[in-house]
Image (tube, grey):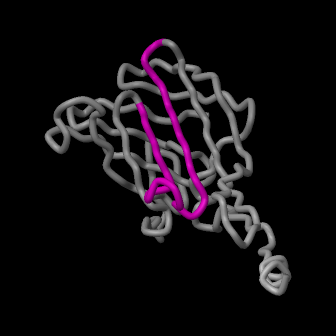
Amino acid sequence: MLFLGSVAGCTKKDKYYRFSEKELDFVSYSQGQTLKFLDTLGQVQTVPQLVYRREMVDVTYWSLWGGREFLEQYEVRYSSGQGISLDVSLEAGSLTSGYGFSLMVNNFWRDLTPEEEVASPVPTVINGQTYQNVYTFTAYPTSGGYKKDSATVFWNREYGLIQLLYSNGKSITRTD
C-alpha cells in the first residue's frame, strides 16, 4: 500500500517542447501561401503550397512516473509541377532526428541544427533587394555526387528560401 501511494505521488506534469526563438527563424511560411521564384532564364514560376502542418505531436513513451510529452512540428511542401519544388520540416529541440531542420529544394537537401546556425549580422543584397539576418548554408544532391556537387542556400525568417545558387551558375530566386 505504501508503494502504490509513493508511485501515485510521483506523477509528472505534461511537458511541451515548443520551438525556440532561434528555431522560429526556420518557420517561414504560413498556411495557404503561394511563392514566386525567378529562374535562371528569367521566367517567373508560381509555386503553390501542397502541404501545411504545424502542430503539437504526442511523443510520450511509456513511463512508470506518468506525464506526457508533446513535440512541436512544422512541415510545408510546395511544387510548381514545372521543376521547382520545396520541402521544409522542423522539429522543436531536435529531439527525434538529431538535426531538427530539413530542407529539400529541387533534389538538393540539407539537414541542420538551427541552434548551431548563425545569420549574417550585416544586410545581404540578393538580386538587388536587401535582406536582414540571412543564413547561408550548403545543400547537396539527393542522389549521387554527395559533396562533388552542391548548391548554396540563402534563407531568412521573413522570406524562407531567398535564393538557391547551383554550382553550375544557375539559380532560383524568390520574387514575391
The answer to which image quadrant residue 103 occupies is: top left
Q: Position of residue 166 (x, y in %)?
A: 28, 36
Q: Is residue 170 above or below residue 54?
A: above
Q: Tell me which segment is drawn in magenta.
A: 82-105
Q: Residue at x 51, y 55 (%)?
A: 96
Q: Position of residue 150 (x, y in %)?
A: 24, 41
The extreme top residue here reads 82
Q: Is residue 168 left or right of residue 46?
A: left
Assign the N terminus to one quadrant of the image: bottom right
Q: Residue at x 25, y 29 (%)?
A: 143
Q: Is residue 143 left or right of residue 46?
A: left
Assign the C terminus to one quadrant of the image: top right
The answer to which image quadrant residue 18 occupies is: bottom right
The extreme left residue here reads 148
Q: Position of residue 116 (x, y in %)?
A: 43, 68
Does 84 appear in magenta? yes
Q: Position of residue 108 (x, y in %)?
A: 34, 35
Q: Nearer the viewer, residue 33 or 50?
A: 50
Q: How many marks?
A: 0
Q: Residue at x 16, y 34 (%)?
A: 145
The answer to which image quadrant residue 41 occupies is: top left
Q: Nearer the viewer, residue 31 or 96?
A: 96
Q: Is residue 135 above or below residue 79?
A: below
Q: Residue at x 36, y 53 (%)?
A: 137
Does 92 appear in magenta? yes
